[in-house]
Image: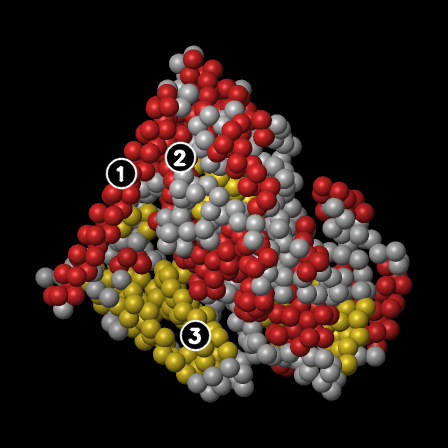
Amino acid sequence: MKRTYTILLLLIGILLQKSVAQDAKMKAHVDGLLKKMTIEEKIGQLNLPVAGWVPTGTTVSKDTEDKIKSGQVGGMFGYYDPVRMKAIQKIAVEQSRMKIPLFFGLDVIHGHRTIFPIPLGMAATWDMALVEKSARIAAQEATAEGLNWTFSPMVDIARDPRWGRISEGNGEDPFLGSAIARAMVKGYQGDDLTQNNTLMACVKHYALYGGAEAGRDYNTVDIGRSSMFNYWLPPYKAAVEAGAGSIMTSFNVVDEVPATANRWLMTDLLRNQWGFKGFVVTDYTAINEMTAHGLGDLQAVSALALKAGVDMDMVGEGFLTTLKKSYDEGKVKMADIDLACRRILEAKWKMGLFKDPYARLDESRPAKEIMTPENRKASREIAARSFVLLKNENQILPLAKTGKTVAFIGPLADNHRDMLGTWVIAGEWEKSVSVMEGVKNVAPQLNTLHSKGANITDDTAFIHRLNFFNQPMVTLDPISPETMLRNALEASAKADIIVAVLGESQSMSGESSSRTDIGIPESQRKLLEELVKTGKPVVLVLFTGRPLTLEWEDAHCAAILNVWAPGTEAGNAIADVLFGDVNPSGKLTATFPRTVGQIPNYYNHKPTGRPYNGSYQTKFQSNYLDSPNYPLYPFGYGIGYSPFTYEEMKLSSAKMSGNGTLTASVKVSNVGKFAGEEVVQLYLSDPVASISRPVRELKGFQKIMLQPGESKVVEFKITPELLKFYNYELKYDWEPGEFKIGIGGNARDVKEQVVNWEKSVRP
Ligand code: NOJ
């Protein structure tokens, strides 16, 4: 024992020495460069133009290659073509005076070429190994195409499904969100960022971007300090602690100051308290936008951003065009410019770019490493595990592979484009598997019928807004809606079961895609009503980038399988689940409200002074005249083909003290006919504290596999670490007293027990 301990200490010592030596080497290299650089060249390193790919703002970069030659560019984003990028890197390292290599970034969000489920779907797997694997594959493919930096993970907590970017995040919970943040960083960066198959992660959008008021993208945010620390900031902190190399500012204000000029956020908290060692990049033209926030002209806001802790300016060129002037006028110091430039150069060192600027620019890699059968297989397996079965009356699912006639109806049934979801720059929708193709692959003997039945939407003005950059993402079918409906009903008449494949198209969620009506679009809803009227069982396969309002669908469809936007292997994965080769095990990470009027509706809300949980309105209680408070589907919810039962939870003790460890255990049984996975969730609450604490908070989860008839005892170890929160003074600690502990299959169905936890044993 003693020997192992000594060896371990020795090893840690050696590693520490190695890293100190590495740091010293890096410092010497960067010091050397800084000494030789002119102020213009230093500012140039802080400039990040966009090229190649479509922009996400109204400004576009110009004359980039000339700027590279004259040392005015630190990195670029938008390209994913190693031949072109190699030529550009050559300009930087051969034709610019300082010969400093460039970064190459891109939004690689849920896969690069092989697309995985949208992040909200990935989160629904609750499987950190799968999350990490998807990021690893994305890094492998992206580096094969020349990239060394991704603008991911997006770890913004979101409680408002009107916000289109809820699709790009992990949902509403900070504990789960933190675990996913760590897994993504690990998957992208691996253990050694100098390896040519790793990508530097960029955590975004720091901070609180998901708190946009009214769910309107880019809108203002109003969140108090302790709330920020307890519910919104943990995932960014987790990503930083996992070693993320960079972080992106958000467009919104944080405590009244735009994030991009918020020194408290970027310097006091991020660097001084959390110990972040990487660099900060703005979001797209976020510096320039601070003029509209009311903080001054471009020169003023650029100086503010630099002094607050921004190192790199995305697209807006506020740094490039004004920092020298600010320096000459004494408004910024050389030390501020040096510090930002140092951080950029250090990142390049950490990526191994000074050693070999071409390490990830190998033209022979794409042919071997992109969309390999293994990558597609992983995408299929992960997608199937992201689906959430919301309803399954009379065990209508899984469907038999032969025997019955099944009509697949809906605009998403034979569709490729919308399989991938939002933010898929390099993803090729033409290579995705449609639902009909998947059904043919998995159940070739099945008697199937297909009919489109409706347009995604009939609203031409809405279609125009969906088809940004003139891409025909959503089109009106030349056949009239009436004829499409008639054809669909004819097909349905010949079927035993109807599978309605409906929902949101790709551009209905994602950036700048907020909605005030989050139902299935009207044209499709009308179709669904007609299908239900046939009296045949209707299985709804639902595509969505956000929680939708589904009260009517829940009341009228026999089954609802929520498939998000599953990625390249969509159709195969959906068929795997529909026909029972995979038992669905996904669980929601964002609450599905009954109506838009209930929003925000999230599980870890605070109690009110007049709490209410009933169904009907009671005067002078916190409720609605026309709706219950509770959502349609709670956080953590999702069923499978086999029911799981939970026995009474057991606590190792009802009284605890000091740093003891409490064990909470529960026996979970698979009482159905299918082997399946269940996500067992641990919830805690602190009903008496110095500040009002949430009614319930997720503090642990385990995904277990159970064979039919099998039971397992699942144990959670609870230490005071899990009881901690930020109090009004932002002190992170726990307060003694009563705690409620519960284990369940979702945030609603949890039976709690009380434990008394004192700071120390009472005399
Ligand atoms: C704006 C988005 O907010 C951000 O997430 C993205 O990384 C940048 N555009 C770059 O495309």
Instruction: Tell me the residue at 47%/15% (across/down).
Output: 325
Identify the mark at residue 345; answer none if there is no mark.
2
Instruction: Tell me the residue at 57%/68% (across/down).
Output: 377
At label 1, which amino acid type do we have? Ala
User: Which residue is label 3 attached to?
Assistant: 704
Q: Secondary structure at mark 3?
A: strand
Instruction: Tell me the residue at 63%/39% (across/down).
Output: 52
Residue 641 position within the rendered picture, expressed as x and y whole percent measured from the top left:
57, 79
* Residue 251 visible to an observer of this rendering: no
Mark toward the viewer: 3 or 2: 2
For residue 4, side relative to residue 563 (left or right): left
Measured in 3D between alpha carbons, the distance from the residue under mark 3 to the one under mark 1, in whole angstroms, is 46 Å
For residue 562, side relative to residue 719 (left or right): right
> N-terminal of the two: label 3 or label 2?
2
User: Which residue is label 1 attached to?
Assistant: 24
Quarter of the image where one finds residue 659: bottom left
At label 3, which amino acid type do we have? Ile
Residue toward you, 249 or 363? 363
Q: Secondary structure at mark 2?
A: helix
Q: Determine whether 41 is above or below 198 in the image.
A: above
Q: Residues within 10 Å of mark 3 (few under 14, many from 20)?
A: few
Mark toward the viewer: 3 or 1: 1
Residue 247 position within the rendered picture, expressed as x and y whole percent measured from the top left:
44, 41
At label 2, which amino acid type do we have? Leu
